[in-house]
Image (spheres, helix red, strand yellow):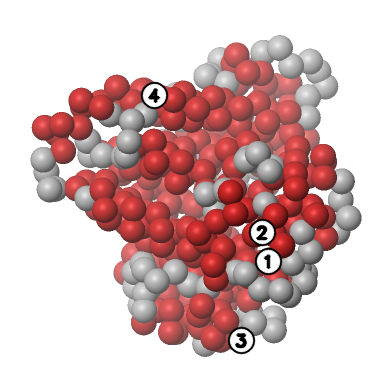
Amino acid sequence: MYGWEMLSFNIHDGFLEAIVRGNRSGLLTAADYNNLCQCETLDDIKMHLTATEYGPYLQNEPSPLHTTTIVEKCTLKLVDEYKHMLCQANEPLSTFLQYITYGHMIDNVVLIVTGTLHERDVNELLEKCHPLGMFDSIASLAVAQNMRELYRLVLVDTPLAPYFSECITSEDLDDMNIEIMRNTLYKAYLEDFYKFCQKLGGATAEIMCDLLSFEADRRAVNITINSIGTELTRDDRRKLYSNFGLLYPYGHEELAVCEDVDQVRGAMEKYPPYQSIFSRISYGESQMLDKAFYEEEVRRLCLSFEQQFHYAVFFAYIRLREQEIRNLMWISECVAQNQKNRVHDSVVFIF
């Protein structure tokens, strides 16, 4: 029952909630980002980061540094923190933490299958996979020729198996089918995660359902914009939208028939929470939409720390840390390519 979590929450989960709230204080601040944006070389970035919680992961890296090294080491810190929390967690928190990684598993499957389609080396692809989304048989994905084989040979023993029921066809894998597969898997994953959070009840259900609804709505907008001008029909597009969220069902009906970005904007501005996002973007500036959505997501994730005795703080912390790594990757790339005038374009401040 909502409001009664405080009676029993700390028995099993109080220690880990304290850990994750302590970890949050180690996220980079606006002052850190301002200093990083003034760096002239990647070694300057490393020197600044050694004074933060990333220090132990970067201090022994030799020069010259590469952007991939910085991102890899920062991701390693996130993975170590996640594994520590997972080892300490009891049910149902351990299942909740595992759900958080399923999105990375889907991305890794798509990366391997797409790379194999374009005849890339499997070992090279495995290096690019996100470590939170790895599973034992991932290298075997390279042998699959269609969705049915992909499921039968590899994915039947992974947590993604239940999500493949809508994807299994005998069609050969090509770029369009793979992208449809990704979005169908994400739809099934988000709906499953949403139901799991509803089952948990209390503050966890309230906050997580809001965060997942936002994620579902953002994906609906991205699917619509990316499918404009492709062979995807309106019905196909509608099937890829998640069956929950603020836009469900009437917003989905409007998005399914949109034929340009301005029509998408018109449909979204009818919903007050999204009106503020689109009001920051001029007509025709769809490339700034991702940043606006990330900023809104960060705002919501930070708000989840305002309440206690719920699991959403674990989801929020991992997402905020991932956004921080995206920020560091963008800053590092701008510095490495001598494009410092663009360094603020994609940085999303967290605190």
First in sequence: mark 1 vs mark 4 = 4
Residue 250, by quadrant, is bottom left
CB within 8 Å, label 3 to label 1: no
Q: Which residue is mark 2?
A: 152
Q: Which residue is mark 4?
A: 88
Question: Gap in Å between the C-alphas at discs 1 and 4?
Answer: 37 Å
- Identify which residue, 113 or 158, lies in the foreground: 158
| Kind of residue at disc 2 | Arg
- Which of the two marks, 3 or 1, is nearer to us in this view? 1
Residue at 65% over, 59% down: 151
Q: Is residue 116 visible?
A: yes
Q: Which residue is mark 1?
A: 148
Q: Which residue is mark 3?
A: 233
Mark 4 residue element:
helix
Residue at 50% over, 80% down: 238
Q: Is residue 286 visible?
A: no
- Identify which residue, 201 or 315, lies in the foreground: 201
CB within 8 Å, label 2 to label 1: yes
Query: Residue 123's x, y, as percent?
Result: 82, 39
First in sequence: mark 3 vs mark 1 = 1
| Kind of residue at disc 4 | Gln
